Amino acid sequence: MVEKEKIDLRVRLGSLELATPIVTASGTSGYGLEYADLADFSAIGAFFTKSITLEPRKGNPPPRVVETRAGLLNAIGLANVGLEVFLKEKVPQFKRIPSPVIVNVAGRTIDEYTQVAAKLDEVEQINGLELNISCPNVKEGGQTIGTDAKQVSKIVSALRQVVKRCLLVVKLSPNVTDILEPAKAAVEAGADCLSLVNTFTSLAIDINKQQPILANITGGLSGPAIKPIALYMVHRVYTQLCKKANVPIIGMGGVQFGSDAIEFLLAGATAVGVGTALFVEPNSPAILAEDIKKYLADRGLESPAEITGKLQLPEKTD
Amino acid sequence: MPPKNNLTRIFQSRRRHYRGRVVGRRDISREFAWIDLEAEQFTGAKPGQFVIVQCADNTDQLAGHAWQDTTQWPRAKGVELQDRVALLRRPFSIADMPHGRDGSRFSLHFRAVGPGTRWLAENARLGAELQIIGPLGNGFKIKDVHQAILVAGGIGAAAMSFLAKELRNQGSEVVLLLGAKNRELLPFSLIDGAVIDSEGEPSLCCEFFSELGVRVSISTDDGSVGKSGLLSETLADYLSRHRELSQSGTVVYTCGPEAMMAKIVQVAAQQQLPCQVCMERHMACGLGACQACVCRQKQNQDESDWVYKLVCSNGPVFDGQSILW
């Protein structure tokens, strides 16, 4: 047993050092200060913003969300203020965020992504860029790129040319036959870090109206319902790719309790994203960080890095 | 890059997040209940504002999350294992502040219809503690209002009781037009022996409001009590009988189903009366982060020029004329 106070929750994510392995999943904590008086920000390892696009986007018509069993279906449609307003109004708030800030970047075309990323890479208060090629709720860009390994390769290579200072994170879509293919394409094209998974394309139906519940028809499923699938995908990408390539993974999908976060670490994640659970408990990062500390202390461990990828597999028998 | 830990102190005050203890409860009918909550941190709410409440067995999530020595891992109760458990918090209008706006007591008035509200009906017993965030949102504007016409459909009435009280406290004249599907689904109890006009003329017939001296008109879709018909017709009839109201200082306030509110705004506009609407939307966070709860707001007279506004943080109260339904 190690004294809880001696445990150092810091983890390294490429060039960044995070105070804890818990990060906020993009799109679930706004532009920065929405939870300022509801959460202990010192427990957040890195703050991931909502997606930013070149031009402002209104997003999809309502209803944009519907709760399903153990899950949340959303089709926000990348509603955001656009790059210009973001730089002028939101970026100055980042000085109040104690953790590194990673801005999620989206676009309709590779050119749009590149323009936004190049501009944001010059902003000192921004420490990383997360490439959103996995949004299931837009007609152009998003997962239309992320589900095609060739396109992934193309966009990450393009971004690699303009992103010089920031950590380049690529967020993968789970809506593929094998997530390893886009993951490989991203790593080979120069991604510093992978985050997975985004939401699962899903449908909710109102049987009385015999209509879809969301105005967008389909949405992306998040929440506890997706955790086992996300864990499988993180484990696959870690063992088949990232372990050898030495590329850190941010694992996410249905993380609500400390035990969920530890599962993702064991499966191979270096850091863990919490998203939908923030809507239930905005202070989740602090609670989860405390749980991880306790878990490590009980086992005589001193750092979350010691359990990353330490899932013990049964010996093969046949 | 080292963590910027020296700046964390500003985030330590979690002033809007606390437990509320149930100190009063009244079951109004089979589906409607009213609870009073006590929470020291809760103060200064305005009518029209709301709170978000965790409505599931892991209400005790703060404790359930935390590692407890010598015990097992916190179990994911409910959410993963049971049928139809509310995952997200649920929004509720603040129905009253029984000890005044500076008090630490507030009331919620709700109808048990879904997994969240049914859980609340079962579990919000005296002494129970609920996880609360709020007050949230902007609230109604009541300054310089001389006469107020409140129009509430169904559980939309939850936003009207506190509004009526604050309006009366500043000396405004208040009348409530209350509508429901049928007698069973009236959100408030009627006073025994009260005379209820079948033409919709308000009288002192409804609990809570009669104590404030607020007359209430009842309409039901099936006519099982009060006037038979829609609230928009009740309002139009009321305004035609009370021409003296078409002057400055009269405001219509409404909360209820969207189609009803759209009609109420129209009727008010025909008489040149301003109308404030309290909007409802599915919310995920209630705090302006998730961008889920949008409604369309006109920028000017041109209906093609509109923007999405967030019901949780730009509203829930909007100028009815500005909403593109």
Image: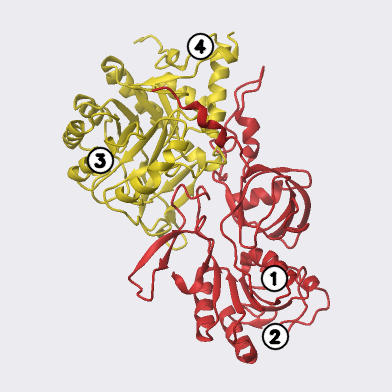
Q: Which mark is residue A178?
A: none
Residue identified by numbered label 3: A119
Residue identified by numbered label 4: A302
Q: Which chain is red?
A: B
Q: Which chain is yellow?
A: A
* Residues tagged 3 and 4 counted as in contact (Cβ below 8 A): no
- The correct choice, above or below, for B61 with respect to B158 in the image is above
Spatial separation of the CA atoms under disc 3 and disc 4: 39 Å
Indicate the position of residue B288 as horizontal and vertical percent values.
Answer: 48, 50
Label 3 neighbourhood size at 10 Å, few (<14), some (14-19), many (20+)? some
Looking at the rendered structure, the kind of residue marked 2 is Glu
Looking at the rendered structure, the kind of residue marked 4 is Glu
Indicate the position of residue B324 as horizontal and vertical percent values.
Answer: 42, 70
In the rendered view, does B114 fall on the left or right side of A253? Answer: right
Residue identified by numbered label 1: B167
Looking at the rendered structure, the kind of residue marked 3 is Lys
Q: Secondary structure at mark 2?
A: loop
- The correct choice, above or below, for B161 with respect to A144 in the image is below
Residue identified by numbered label 2: B201
Q: Secondary structure at mark 3?
A: helix
Same chain check for tags 2 and 1: yes
Chain letter for mark 2? B
Spatial separation of the CA atoms under disc 2 and disc 1: 20 Å
